Amino acid sequence: MIAHVFGVVVEKFGTSVIVDVHGVGYEVQLAAGDFDDTLIDSTVKFYTYHHVREQSQELFGFSSLIAKKLFELLITVQGVGPKAALAILSLGNSEVVRNAIANGDAVFITRASGVGKKTAERVVVDLSDKVGHAIRTDVNSIGLSNIIIGSDEAVEALMALGYNLNDAAKALEGISTELSTAERVTQALRGKS
């Protein structure tokens, strides 16, 4: 299986890019956010899911390991194939989608192209206990609440060490986001908060 591609983006079309890896072009389908952020002639690394069917092979790419793991969870749900999972991930960054699932927000999931009410409900029922707790909010210096969004390198590091998304999120609960990634991972591994 192809775990990731690293190369130069030479073409963009639809929701796919062609990544040139030492003279071989790989077509990689991306969620809307990753597609919009990708520029022609830029060097990129996408974590990939290699989908093999009788008649074709497709690569689905993700800028973060968290997004790839969420995609893999989504396709375990009956009625959600790779295209529907990519459409769900196109609703927002992976943390927004994960939070919607954790909160049981099926209405948010139905906004994805090709995903109906029953499928969206199945997604939240099947995955709400697998994606971790809803994201928390932090209060900034002027008293406004900020939602913690985006890829968390500490979560990705724990997932690379074998944690699933839910366990990685739990391990990092209560550990200050002001610490470096290495310090956060070390504390999570020690079980301290």
Image: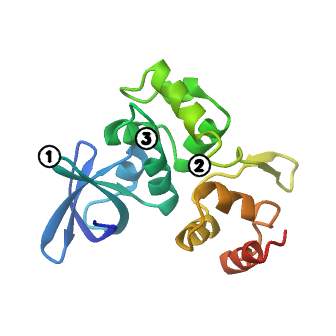
Quarter holding the C terminus is bottom right
Name the secondary structure under disc 1: loop
How far apart are the two marked residues, 1 and 3, measured between alpha carbons?
26 Å
In the rendered structure, which amino acid carries the disc numbered 3?
Answer: Ser
**Is 20 in front, or is 173?**
173
Residue 117 placement (x, y as % from top left): 49, 19
Q: Are marks 2 and 1 in contact (CB under 8 Å)?
A: no
Name the secondary structure under disc 2: helix
In the rendered structure, which amino acid carries the disc numbered 2?
Answer: Glu
Q: Residues within 10 Å of mark 1 (few under 14, many from 20)?
A: few
Compared across the picture, whether 52 is left or right of 64 comes to: left
Residue at 77% x, 76% y is 187
Q: How is the image coloured?
A: rainbow
How far apart are the two marked residues, 3 and 2, measured between alpha carbons?
12 Å
Residue at 64% x, 51% y is 149
Q: Residues within 10 Å of mark 2 (few under 14, many from 20)?
A: many
In the rendered structure, which amino acid carries the disc numbered 1?
Answer: Glu
Which residue was labeled with disc 3? 90
Q: Residues within 10 Å of mark 3 (few under 14, many from 20)?
A: many
- Residue 35: image tag: none
Which residue was labeled with disc 2? 95
Which residue was labeled with disc 1? 54
Q: Earlier in the sequence, mark 2 or mark 1?
A: 1
Residue 26 placement (x, y as % from top left): 19, 62
Q: Earlier in the sequence, mark 3 or mark 2?
A: 3
